[in-house]
């Protein structure tokens, strides 16, 4: 081989290696920064029992947009309000598909649910039906008497406990109130025995669904394990969801039998959905109806309950906040009176408390996970097709660049603030934003302040068993929603 050929070959090899190196280097730069993955498991070991907190800590190292390899799945985590706005608003269409957890395969729920369906004609039909028949202003106004009645029942039960010196499980009574509100709206009947001391199986079922759906599941990170269901999460969710589906089947069949016999028509959601189903079976069928009910029961009861419980816990931890809000309630509403929905706009400090609760304890700390169906450019990075997208609203709510003393519960921070919670101000997006914002947020923003304000305007509250406020356990229990690990138990007394 002559010298020129050798030089030419050597130059070719160097050029080839240089091009390959540039390609590889460019590819590595395209992904957002993140921890180096371990073989096979990637960065799964870094999630811990509270992934929202672990991911927030990692974001302090790798930045507000970072990528992790979780098993076989590339996951991109957003921990900044600016980038969250880019994902949920500016590039909403590219990020609108859901990442489907294996737990939602129970009873094929993901194929019929407005939460998990992709943005498609069927999703638009279901979303329109819910917006018109459940969450429009006119429908919410028409059902206001139901919410008022359920709050009266809640206060009556707490009054009985006050007279007897009994402890109130705040989460349990808030759950029953929300459950019976929803069941009356949907079916014109209570599904929970109002404030009996018996165990509430439906609460266990609904909390079980949320807990299982939110658990880190190996099947989600290693799809090859789908048929094994190694952690039995799908199996447990089949049992939980099956109990709700049986309940819904019974209620649907009961109503169909009543219609056949010519009983008086009811003006609830079940009647409306069955009429739509009869008129246009191609739009929705009984599977869609049951999935709508499951979504509403799980989301509406669990999230509102959690918010009321966290708010009461924070208020009991700082008794001066309770005194301050009670002064406002007494001046504007009158001591001992129930709150009506029309009053809420005048209760500035109560609204501040709810905003601060949702900042520190967002019901869904990572929102509902999303997925990209094709490569997407975001902040000069390339998010590869099939990646899971998590928006860590829990971390955004604790961002020192956005909030002064973010780890302290300070409702006063919202006194002169125009920050809203309806998906326009990305510092505070507990319900998400964009086309996939939680459809039930209009109901939550009516129900939560009325429940919380009525509890605070009707009673003084102290912790059970002489627990001092500073010792109140504020540990979180991670699931699809962020629940309080230890139930809040408090004693009501006359104002």
Image: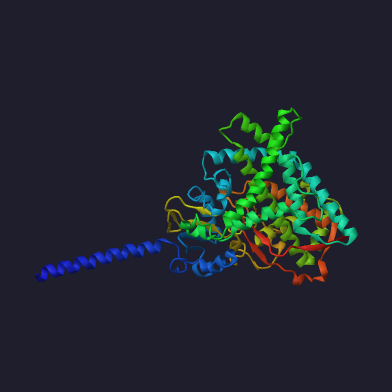
**Which residue shows up at 23% across the image and 65% down it?**
15
Q: Position of residue 363 (x, y in %)?
A: 65, 57
Question: Who is closer to the viewer here, 94 or 277?
Answer: 277
Of the 4 image quadrants, the one containing the N terminus is bottom left
Q: Describe residue 292's horizontal placement relative to residue 120 as left or right.
A: right
> How many numbered callouts?
0
Depth check: give the residue in front, 469 or 160.
Answer: 160
Q: Position of residue 149 (x, y in %)?
A: 81, 45
Q: In the depicted view, which residue is nearer to us: 315 or 165?
A: 165
Vertical side of 53 occupied by 292: above or below = above
Residue at horizontal 69%, vertical 60%?
357
Q: Position of 442 compared to 91: left or right?
A: right
Residue that extends furthest to the left in the rendered view of this protein: 2
Residue 227 lies, in percent from the top left, at: 50, 54
Q: The C terminus lies in which quarter of the figure?
A: bottom right
Kindly give the residue lying farthest to the front in the view shown. 228
Residue 367: name its quadrant: bottom right
Task: Report the side of 305 relative to 9 (left or right).
Answer: right
Relative image position of residue 325 (x, y in whole percent): 79, 59
**Colour scheme employed for the rendering of this structure:** rainbow
Q: Is residue 101 visible?
A: no
| Residue 217 quadrant | bottom right
Residue that protrudes farthest toward the top in the picture:
262
Up-down relation of residue 294 to residue 172 (above or below): above
């Amino acid at each position: 081989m002559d010298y020129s050929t050798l030089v030419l070959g050597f130059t070719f090899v160097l050029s080839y290696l240089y091009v390959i190196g540039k390609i590889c280097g460019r590819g590595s730069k395209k992904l957002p920064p993140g921890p180096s993955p371990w073989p096979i498991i990637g960065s799964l070991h870094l999630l811990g029992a509270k992934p929202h907190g672990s991911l927030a800590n990692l974001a302090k190292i790798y930045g507000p947009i970072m990528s992790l390899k979780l098993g076989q799945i590339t996951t991109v985590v957003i921990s900044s309000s600016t980038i969250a706005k880019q994902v949920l608003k500016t590039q909403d269409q590219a990020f609108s598909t859901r990442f489907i957890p294996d737990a939602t395969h129970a009873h094929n729920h993901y194929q019929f649910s407005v939460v998990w369906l992709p943005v498609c004609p069927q999703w638009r039909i279901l979303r329109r039906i819910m917006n018109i028949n459940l969450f429009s202003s006119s429908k919410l106004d028409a059902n206001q008497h139901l919410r008022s009645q359920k709050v009266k029942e809640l206060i009556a039960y707490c009054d009985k406990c006050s007279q007897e010196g009994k402890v109130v499980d705040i989460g349990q009574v808030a759950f029953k109130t929300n459950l019976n509100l929803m069941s009356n709206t949907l079916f014109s009947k209570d599904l929970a025995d109002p404030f009996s001391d018996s165990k509430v199986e439906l609460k266990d079922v609904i909390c079980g669904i949320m807990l299982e759906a939110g658990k880190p599941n190996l099947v989600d990170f290693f799809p090859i394990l789908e048929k094994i269901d190694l952690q039995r999460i799908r199996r447990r969710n089949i049992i939980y969801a099956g109990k709700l589906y049986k309940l819904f089947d019974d209620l649907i069949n009961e109503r169909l039998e009543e219609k056949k016999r010519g009983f008086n028509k009811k003006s609830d959601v079940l009647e409306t959905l069955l009429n739509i189903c009869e008129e246009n079976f191609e739009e929705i069928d009984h599977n869609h109806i049951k999935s709508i009910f499951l979504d509403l029961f799980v989301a509406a009861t669990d999230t509102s309950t959690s918010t009321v419980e966290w708010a009461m816990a924070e208020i009991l931890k700082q008794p001066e906040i309770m005194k301050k809000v009670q002064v406002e309630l007494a001046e504007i509403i009158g001591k001992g009176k129930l709150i009506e929905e029309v009053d809420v706009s005048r209760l500035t400090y109560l609204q501040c408390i709810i905003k601060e609760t949702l900042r520190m304890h967002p019901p869904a700390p990572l929102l509902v996970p999303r997925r990209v169906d094709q490569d997407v450019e975001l902040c000069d990075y390339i998010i590869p097709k099939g990646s899971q997208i998590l928006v860590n609203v829990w971390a955004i709510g604790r961002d020192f660049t956005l909030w002064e003393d973010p780890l302290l519960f300070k409702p006063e921070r919202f006194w002169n603030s125009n920050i809203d919670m309806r998906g326009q101000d990305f510092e505070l997006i507990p319900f998400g934003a964009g086309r996939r914002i939680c459809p039930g947020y209009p109901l939550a923003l009516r129900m939560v302040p009325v429940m919380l304000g009525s509890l605070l305007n009707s009673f003084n509250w102290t912790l059970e068993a002489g627990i001092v406020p500073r010792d109140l356990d504020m540990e979180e229990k991670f699931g699809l929603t962020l629940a309080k690990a230890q139930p809040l138990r408090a004693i009501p007394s006359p104002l």
